[in-house]
Image (tube, rainbow, N blue to C red):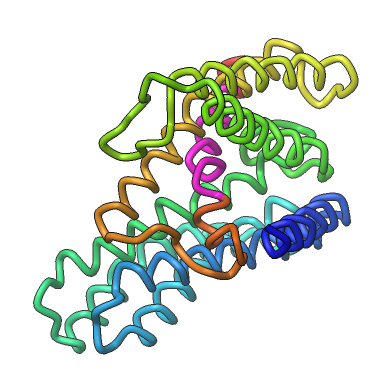
């Protein structure tokens, strides 16, 4: 219990410092989270392969590059417009690189392994890259306004509010299983309770923060509840298929980075969609 508490305090301090320290610390924080999440994912997917280290390095490096190039443009950290096109091109170029890597490694399942690499880019890299655009104050996509830490923190807090209260209320009041085949501990009571608390949190944010309008905050809370929960179930499905409990051990008592950011990653594209539809 003590170890879990210490990890939670350090994790919270790192997140708050990274988000509120400015755009450079935010960019660096999520670069580390992106790279670490990719490293974990490829470690799980290629766990039985003899070229595990090479696959993890290649997958993580090419997976992180679009975030660095495109996200840097979004935050005005790198100002050369050609880097945006380079980042987009790299996403497509990476597919060829992964195919060539498998050609020389001579695996038994080349289609499957190339798919693993591309899964990491779609599942992890693209959502965190999109987050750099959502952090801006002049739009929700391809705008380079000023960095707004409360936007990022608000998006995170909605997911964590839903997740925390779904766990607390579900463990105490839950009787009806939400999706027992994948996650036996999740209940409808927890889902509803977490949703109500997330909606209340969104309404409270709308009263004190002017980053979004009240309808936008409520729409974002809806996304956090529905798609954040689905994201958590998706990762539970992946872990169950591999016969593991946690994605990693980087955070003692809490598992790995994927365990902590699965719901948030899955919700980010839907955050963007909700903001686009309510703008």
**Dominant secondary structure, magenta:** helix
Q: Is residue 21 visible?
A: yes
Q: Is residue 4 left or right of residue 123?
A: right
Comparing 162 with 152, the one in front is 162
Place residue 144 in its image quadrant.
top right
| Coordinates of residue 133 in the picture (x, y in percent) | 66, 43
Q: Residue at x 29, y 74 (%)?
A: 46
Comparing 260 with 81, the one in front is 260
The boundaries of the magenta stretch are 261-274
Comparing 104 with 246, the one in front is 246
| Coordinates of residue 216 in the picture (x, y in percent) | 68, 17
Above or below for 180 versus 41: above
Above or below for 151 versus 44: above
Q: Is residue 215 left or right of residue 236?
A: right
Q: Is residue 253 left or right of residue 109?
A: right
Q: How many marks?
A: 0
Place residue 233 in its image quadrant.
top left
Q: Is residue 186 left or right of residue 72?
A: left
Above or below for 164 versus 169: below
Q: Residue at x 48, y 40 (%)?
A: 266
């Amino acid at each position: 219990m003590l170890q879990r508490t210490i990890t939670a305090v350090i994790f919270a301090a790192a997140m708050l410092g990274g988000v509120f320290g400015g755009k450079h610390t935010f960019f660096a924080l999520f670069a580390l989270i992106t790279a670490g999440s990719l490293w974990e994912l490829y470690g799980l997917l290629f766990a039985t392969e003899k070229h595990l280290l090479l696959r993890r390095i290649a997958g993580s490096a090419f997976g992180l590059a679009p975030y660095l190039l495109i996200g840097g443009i979004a935050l005005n950290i790198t100002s050369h417009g050609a880097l945006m096109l380079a980042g987009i091109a790299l996403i497509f170029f990476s597919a060829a690189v992964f195919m060539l890597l498998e050609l020389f490694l001579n695996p038994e399942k080349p289609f499957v392994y190339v798919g693993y690499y591309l899964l990491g880019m779609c599942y992890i890299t693209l959502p965190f890259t999109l987050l750099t655009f959502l952090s801006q104050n002049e739009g929700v996509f391809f705008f380079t306004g000023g960095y707004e830490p409360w936007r990022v923190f608000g998006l995170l807090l909605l997911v964590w509010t839903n997740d925390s209260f779904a766990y607390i209320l579900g463990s105490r009041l839950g009787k009806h299983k939400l999706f027992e085949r994948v996650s036996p501990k999740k209940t409808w009571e927890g889902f509803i309770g977490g949703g109500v608390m997330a909606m209340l949190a969104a309404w409270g944010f709308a009263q004190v923060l002017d980053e979004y309008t009240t309808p936008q905050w409520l729409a974002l809370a809806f996304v956090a509840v529905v798609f954040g929960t689905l994201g958590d179930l998706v990762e539970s499905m992946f872990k169950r298929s591999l016969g593991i409990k946690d994605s990693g051990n980087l955070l003692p008592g809490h598992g790995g980075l994927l365990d902590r950011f699965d719901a948030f990653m899955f919700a980010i594209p839907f955050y963007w969609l909700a903001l686009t539809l309510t703008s």
